Image (spheres, grey):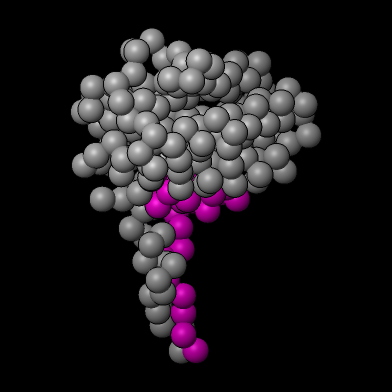
Amino acid sequence: MKSLATILITVMAVFAGCAQTPKTADSNDNGAAVATPESKATAATSENECKICDFDFAAYKGDLKKEEVEGLLLALNDEYHATSIYEEINKKFNNPRPFVNIVEAEKRHADMLKALFDTYKVPVPTNPWPGNVPAFDSVKSACTAGIEAEVVNGGLYDKLFKSTERQDILSVYKALQRASIENHKPAFERCASGGGGGRGNGNGKGMGRGRPMN
């Protein structure tokens, strides 16, 4: 079973070039390819990189720079990926907390990013992840992986902050990172430690503590 962090860490690796194929080997002094643990891990997850980053920059007539478009694509890919994983968990385990709540937050986050796509005339790609996400054998194992994924997500946004100076884009990035670190990660931590994982109320509101999930 692949953890969410194993899959999502690749997103950070491809920030410098959205659709580029990752390097899978180093070379020795004779120029021969030598596999390393890092290159093996990258090769193993290369199929799970940004699935929406194959963008036609030559045809783009909007105001964004290449790195700004790449940033939006990486962010939306991340939200799409998380949404698809959490939807599968909800189906398999009958809408457990915190997933029943967090999946609705991820959808709202995707909508926030889509609004930026529309503002800057970037075509909004469809979600390619349904049916292409890892499975988990328990809610607790999914929550444990979720903790790692939220840490990776926070690091992704640290990188995306450097991709633009546009305040509307930065405002969305900051809000999404804050939700990840301050809301989603603690919810997964409670679940992994045995304080969550019961059935949710199905409406995506609250975490059993009387406050909405961002």
Query: Is 163 placed above or below 209 here?
Result: below
- Frontmost residue, 96 versus 79: 96
Residue that appears at 44% across and 67% down: 38
Res. 22 visible in picture: yes
Q: Quadrant of the C terminus?
A: top right
- What percent of the width, then of the height, locates residue 157? 62, 40
Q: Quadrant of residue 84?
A: top left
- Frontmost residue, 116 versus 143: 143
- Frontmost residue, 199 versus 15: 199
Question: Quick check: 129 left or right of 115?
Answer: left
- What percent of the width, then of the height, locates residue 86? 35, 29
Residue that appears at 23% across and 27% down: 93
Res. 127 visible in picture: no
Residue that appears at 31% across and 40% down: 140
- What percent of the width, then of the height, locates residue 81? 40, 34
Query: Is 201 placed above or below 166 here?
Result: above
- What percent of the width, then of the height, locates residue 188? 43, 37
Q: Is residue 8 magenta?
A: yes
Q: Is residue 140 magenta?
A: no
Extreme top residue here? 203
- Frontmost residue, 104 versus 68: 104
Q: Which residues are magenta?
A: 4-29
Question: Quick check: 20 left or right of 66?
Answer: left
